[in-house]
Image: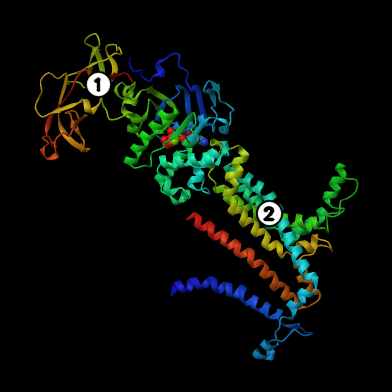
Amino acid sequence: MAETVFAPWDDPTAEPIIRFRNVTKRFGTFVAIDDLTLDIYPQEFFALLGPSGCGKTTMMRMLAGFENPTEGSIELAGKDIAGVPANKRAVNMMFQSYALFPHLSIWDNIAFGLRRETSDKAAISARVEEMLKLTRLEKLARRKPHQISGGQRQRVALARSLAKAPKLLLLDEPLGALDAKLREATQFELMDIQEKTGTTFVIVTHDQEEAMTVASRIAVMDEGRIMQVATPDRIYEAPASVYVADFIGDVNILAGTVTATGADTYALTWKDGAAPVTAVSEATFTDGQQAHLAVRPEKVAIHTTKPEDVDNLLKGKVLDIAYLGNLSTYHVELPGGQIIKAQTANTRRLSRRSITWEDPVWVGWTKTAGVLLDT
Amino acid sequence: MRRAALISVPYIWLLALFLIPFLVVFKISLSDIALAIPPYTPTMRDGFWNMLSQLDFENFIFLTEDDLYWKAYVSSLQIALISTVLTLMVGYPMAYAMARAPDQWRPTLLMLVILPFWTSFLIRVYAWVGILSNEGFLNQFLLWVGVIGEPLTILNTNTAVYIGIVYTYLPFMILPIYSALDRLDGSLIEAAEDLGCSRLKAFWLVTVPLSKNGIIAGCFLVFIPALGEFVIPSLLGGSSTLMIGKVLFEEFFSNRDWPVASAVAVILLLILIVPIVLFQRNEQRQAEAET
Ligand SMILES: Nc1ncnc2c1ncn2[C@@H]1O[C@H](COP(=O)(O)OP(=O)(O)OP(=O)(O)O)[C@@H](O)[C@H]1O
Ligand SMILES: [Mg+2]
């Protein structure tokens, strides 16, 4: 039996749990969300990614019931939620500012939502203990929020929003204040919870790696609009625009005009007098059209001697080396001043590395390494 | 040296304006009434040691013998307590509305709360006489509307005293509560609603506890001066309104019995020390919670 891939967005019969239909949100004349249409499916781990102020929190607040769309409608499990107050929605939100109750202990903060739906003391207590354990806060249960650290507060906020096991959980930058180790552990914890409970997660993050790790799909936003929604690998390997390519990860962009040289191969003239680069593209371009070639640094190889049989090869000299431990990124300056980044894995110790500053080098990539984009 | 000087300033202040006058009053309360100037004996003219030897607690014993005094204390406590609760009930919604008002309105609203202080307190209390008397504005208005057939007697009753105290001390209630509510982070209310609270429940479980310090401060700021209030009961209250401030005034100026009046004042101060200390502790706790 073939393993079924979780991809309800490709299934026309799947019912989305959240449906934004032409939603616009204005604050006065300022447009925070601009005609946004989006479906999110049950049990998804949906990540919102975008620069500060692009409207991520505003989207969350509309889902949670703190803002109403100026235009358009939002459906939750098939029902329009306009006018349903926040306390009647099966949605819990973890606030970007945490919003912990300062007059209550950590324990009571986590129990707050549970107490609203049941008076069964034993059940509440069991659930709170479970949440404390999950977020490793057992020792701090009796403290007040102002007596714990920023990262601990973030975990309390997370525990509080998880406690009610909602259908839909909105996490507004849930892990920003955690150290790398704990963040990774919590990411896996979140995925685990998601798998166990089947809760749908919508998560806002500034950390692309985090989005890549946890998300089933990623939406890249800019100025209230969605630029692309796709699975992490599609977002990374097949960005829909230069904006998305540039926003997610590192990328080299060559801009110029294209001419078709084969059925799906194009030559991009990126600089007068330089040899054009070739690229394969599924999208079709007309001759003379403006286009951009986006190539990820790890797909660019760096050579000290001129190699044979490379589709695209450019000569330059090493300007800078960024050492990242497991990887090194070489910034290679081409004769015209353009910088190409090439990344290699550091499989050898630093002292034995052969390339250094000012070295003349060759950078090359295959014709399928990059994506041709029109915008 | 300079530090010591700086620290000593408030203590000198306290000494000059509180402790020394208190000691003088306390000394008078231990003296006997006399037809002289000043109207008590002994005084420093009799020599210090001689004076000390003649002091006694007679006046305090007298206070326990005549039940007018303890009744006046109890009645004052009662009136102060009821007025404080009434002021809280009127002041809290006003403070809440102010804290929720759009930003550009708030300075104006604050101004309106403080505005009455620009006119003399006495004139404002007299104005209430004009409003509440049988031929006053309130009765005339109600008669004109037809709600009542004949004028209500409000002036010279305890009701008028409550109205007067609530009116006078309202700003002292509103301001601390407003400042507590103003600092309250709106996302806490949202979080409470998100976790399943109705508006009312969120108010009760989050807003009220978080404005607790403001409520306590406001209540003390009303209760403490209301307990010794003299002007309001004597202008608005009737002959049956028994308040210790009035008794004190009469002992001093009508009976010219300074020693008994001083004894009344000393007891009043002792009663007030309890809420004042509690108030100080509240302020201190609040300051600690904020750091
Ligand atoms: N109540 C409001 N009144 C006016 N403008 C608002 C309001 N709330 C948000 N905005 C504006 O809407 C835009 C989107 O805000 P939002 O909080 O959604 O950004 P964000 O994507 O969450 O940013 P960040 O990553 O910094 O949290 C911002 O430009 C912000 O200034
Ligand atoms: Mg935000």
- Please state the total of marks drawn on the protein image: 2
Residue density around tag 1, few if under 14, some if 14–19, many if 20 or more, within 10 Å: many
Q: CA distance from mark 2 to mark 1?
A: 73 Å
Going 80% across and 73% down the picture, which residue do you hit? B66
Counting from the top left corner in percent of width and height, residue B109 is at 63, 47
Please give the label number shown on residue B129.
none
Q: Is mark 2 within 8 Å of ligand 1?
A: no
Going 50% across and 33% down the picture, which residue do you hit? A92
Examine the image and state in which quarter residue A338 appears.
top left
Which chain does the numbered disc 1 sit on? A
Counting from the top left corner in percent of width and height, residue A103 is at 53, 49
Going 58% across and 75% down the picture, which residue do you hit? B15
Residue density around tag 2, few if under 14, some if 14–19, many if 20 or more, within 10 Å: many
Q: Which residue is mark 2?
A: B170
Which residue type does callout 1 highlight? Gly
Q: Is residue A189 visible?
A: yes
- Name the residue furthest right: B149
Q: Are both tags, 2 and 1, on one chain?
A: no
The front one of A341 and A174 is A174
- Name the residue furthest front: A122
The front one of B255 and A177 is A177
Which chain does the numbered disc 2 sit on? B
Going 58% across and 43% down the picture, which residue do you hit? B104
Counting from the top left corner in percent of width and height, residue A163 is at 48, 37
Which residue type does callout 2 highlight? Leu
Secondary structure at badge 2 equals helix
Q: Which residue is mark 1?
A: A370
Q: Is residue A222 visible?
A: no
